[in-house]
């Protein structure tokens, strides 16, 4: 009977370990949750910055074309102003006229390029505003998640503190031989007691041999699950 009593205590004692482990598991997954969101945000931010860079590069190209058009238009006008004075000098006249035509053609081609740039800028602008919205949503989500997780972290840490304290207090009631065995097994398997329900060890779900089950019910000795090696206890967890 004394064995059974001690086993019941171990089953109760184990509840503290399970509680602590559950809280630790939650705490372990929190950085992973945040990491996934942060890496999504990094992908979207990188894309956003690359689009912004393309957009400003287009602005720069556009400005270069506008400046070149202004300067060549000015030069063409200066050359055109010279034309009346060189009408008699055929060679110079033809050369100058050819130069003017070339400058005008260059300006026309640049205007075509500017149109292409403007249309590309419109497409980029639509994409940019879409990505900006996604980025801002993700940033807000990450912020909310961080706040929520902070509360979870505090709660779980508090649970661990309380359960550890209660565990230490409860420990005093358990006989040292049982406690030692429990701690040896739980240091390997996380928890040391396999609660038997419907003739199965609930830790590994393996059926307990009939002979062992009979012995377990007698409650005269400590028995280990033949599969997971945990201390078997028939006591209900409630
Ligand atoms: Zn087992």
Image (cartoon, rainbow, N blue to C red):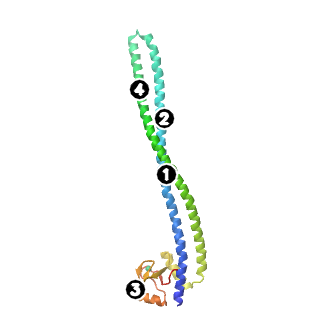
Label of residue 209 in the image: 3
Q: CA distance from mark 4 to mark 3?
A: 94 Å
- Image quadrant of ligand 1 equals bottom left
x 44%, y 32%: residue: 114
The answer to whether residue 168 is above or below residue 152 is: below
Cβ(mark 1) to ligand 1 < 8 Å?
A: no
Q: CA distance from mark 2 to mark 1?
A: 27 Å
- How packed mark 3 is, by other alpha carbons closer than 10 Å (few <14, some 14-19, many 20 or more), is few
Do residues under tags 4 and 3 come within 8 Å of each other at their CB atoms? no
Q: CA distance from mark 2 to mark 3?
A: 82 Å
- Location of mark 4 (residue): 108
Tag 2 secondary structure: helix
- Location of mark 2 (residue): 60
Q: Reading the chain from its start, which is encountered first: label 1 or label 3? A: 1
- Location of mark 1 (residue): 42
Q: Position of residue 156 (x, y in %)?
A: 57, 67
Tag 1 secondary structure: helix
x 51%, y 58%: residue: 34
């Amino acid at each position: 009977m004394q064995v059974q009593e001690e086993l019941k205590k171990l089953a109760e004692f184990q509840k503290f370990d399970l509680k602590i482990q559950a809280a630790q598991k939650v705490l372990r997954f929190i950085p992973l949750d945040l990491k996934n969101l942060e890496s999504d945000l990094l992908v979207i931010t990188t894309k956003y910055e690359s689009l912004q860079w393309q957009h400003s590069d287009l602005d720069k190209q556009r400005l270069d074309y506008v400046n070149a058009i202004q300067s060549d238009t000015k030069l063409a006008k200066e050359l055109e102003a010279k034309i009346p004075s060189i009408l008699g000098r055929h060679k110079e006249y033809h050369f100058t006229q050819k130069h003017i035509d070339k400058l005008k053609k260059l300006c026309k081609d640049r205007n075509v390029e500017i149109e292409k740039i403007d249309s590309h800028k419109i497409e980029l602008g639509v994409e940019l505003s879409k990505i900006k919205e996604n980025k801002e949503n993700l940033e807000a989500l990450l912020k909310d998640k961080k706040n929520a997780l902070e509360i979870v972290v505090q709660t779980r840490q508090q649970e661990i503190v309380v359960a550890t304290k209660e565990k230490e207090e409860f420990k005093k009631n358990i006989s040292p031989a049982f406690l030692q065995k429990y701690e040896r097994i739980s240091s390997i398997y996380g928890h040391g007691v396999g609660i038997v329900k419907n003739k199965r060890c609930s830790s590994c779900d393996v059926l307990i041999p009939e002979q062992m089950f009979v012995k377990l019910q007698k409650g005269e000795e400590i028995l280990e699950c033949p599969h997971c090696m945990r201390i078997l206890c028939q006591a209900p967890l409630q």
